[in-house]
Image (cartoon, rainbow, N blue to C red):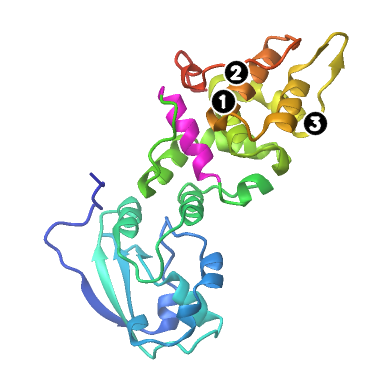
């Protein structure tokens, strides 16, 4: 059952009037998606419509205010992309705090758009104050990688259910590992979704000690040794020869096998043998 927003009981929204310029000053919702990207797609907002004059915001007992919808319309009006209504009718919903405002945003049936996975990741970034440094996370398309890491960490061989709520919750649970990988500024081309999942799991298990392997892998810095290859080279070869074979869970298992061989200073003399990624964190503690 979906979590309910913490709206103050028995208090209906109060409607007030604002000008578009006043509305522009209301802070964005803590969970607001990538408004710039949505504006590029929301061509329907460039045609004035009477329904655009109604918007909604959340108000805390302390007087804090956040938009619930109308972010994209406000940006279009600010940029003079479309004639704004002379007056807006603002439904003010009482909430306890910023977290409740974020939940209300999730539940609110906004007329502007249904959130895509990319929208949800952008909203999760904003909610947790995460500003990506790398192209890998700046792309904002890694919801599946993070959900798969979460599912595997719980002993399941599949991703956590892809619902909107899970993106925000899961991202918050994995923010430390995401930051650790983001700080490496890895080569995006060498990190498809399952490799990102493996990296997150390795950071969860080994903490900062995982940096060396993923830095070397990003730089394609593996070595060929006498009669063997090092784990970085083994994973690079696997990716080159088999990246579309076996499915994402097997790819995660192969990547983790290479990572653990590197941590144990072992070389690879034959093909990588995948480990079961759903068992990888059974005894691991978060660092």
Residue 220 circle label = 3
Helix or strand or loop: what does disc 3 sit on? loop
Rounded to the nearest angstrom, the CA distance separating label 1 from label 2 is 6 Å
Q: Is residue 239 magenta?
A: no
Q: Is residue 33 left or right of residue 1?
A: right
Circles 1 and 2: CB distance less than 8 Å? yes
Compared with 189, 158 (above or below) is above
Who comes first in sequence, dot 1 or dot 2?
A: 1
> Measured from the top left, where is residue 125 in percent x and y?
51, 49
Instruction: Name the residue beneath numbered marker 1.
Output: 250
Question: In the rendering, at what x and y percent does residue 191 appear?
Answer: 67, 38
Of callouts 1 and 3, which one flags the residue occurring earlier in the amino acid sequence? Answer: 3
Q: CA distance from mark 3 to mark 2?
A: 20 Å
Total numbered circles: 3
Query: Measuring 67% from the left and 19% from the top, which residue is drawn there?
Result: 258
Image location (x, y in percent) of residue 48: 43, 88
Dot 2 corresponds to which residue?
274
Q: Residue at the spot x=52%, y=61% of the render?
A: 34
Snapshot quadrant of residue 181 = top right
Q: Nearer the viewer, mark 3 or mark 2?
A: 2
Location of the N terminus by quadrant is: top left
| Along the line of sight, the residue nearer the viewer: 241 or 169 | 241
Between disc 3 and disc 2, whose residue precedes? 3
Q: Which residue, as the protein is rendered here, is positioned at the far left?
A: 10
Q: Which residues are magenta?
A: 142-155
């Amino acid at each position: 059952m979906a979590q309910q927003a913490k709206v103050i009981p028995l208090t209906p929204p109060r409607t007030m009037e604002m000008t578009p310029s006043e509305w522009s000053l209301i802070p964005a919702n803590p969970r607001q998606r990538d408004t710039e990207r949505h504006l590029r797609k929301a061509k329907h907002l460039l045609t004035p419509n009477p329904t655009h004059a109604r918007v909604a915001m959340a108000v805390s007992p302390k007087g804090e205010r956040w938009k619930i919808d109308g972010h994209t319309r406000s940006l279009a009006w600010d940029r003079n992309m479309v004639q704004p209504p002379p007056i807006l009718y603002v439904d003010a919903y009482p909430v306890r705090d910023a977290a409740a405002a974020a939940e209300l945003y999730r539940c609110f049936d906004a007329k502007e758009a249904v959130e895509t996975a990319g929208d949800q990741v952008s909203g999760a970034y904003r909610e947790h104050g995460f500003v990506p440094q790398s192209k890998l996370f700046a792309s904002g398309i890694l919801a599946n990688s993070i959900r798969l890491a979460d599912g595997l960490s719980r002993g399941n061989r599949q991703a956590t259910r892809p619902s909107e709520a899970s993106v925000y919750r899961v991202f918050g649970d994995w923010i430390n590992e995401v930051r650790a990988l983001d700080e490496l500024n890895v080569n995006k081309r060498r990190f498809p979704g399952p490799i990102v999942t493996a990296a997150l799991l390795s950071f969860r298990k080994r903490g900062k000690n995982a940096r060396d392997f993923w830095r070397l892998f990003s730089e394609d810095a593996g070595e060929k040794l006498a009669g063997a290859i090092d784990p970085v080279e083994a994973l690079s070869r696997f990716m080159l020869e088999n990246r579309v074979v076996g499915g994402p869970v097997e790819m995660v298992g192969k990547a983790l096998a290479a990572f653990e061989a590197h941590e144990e200073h072992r070389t690879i003399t034959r093909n990588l043998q995948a480990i079961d990624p759903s068992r990888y964190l059974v005894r691991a503690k978060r660092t």
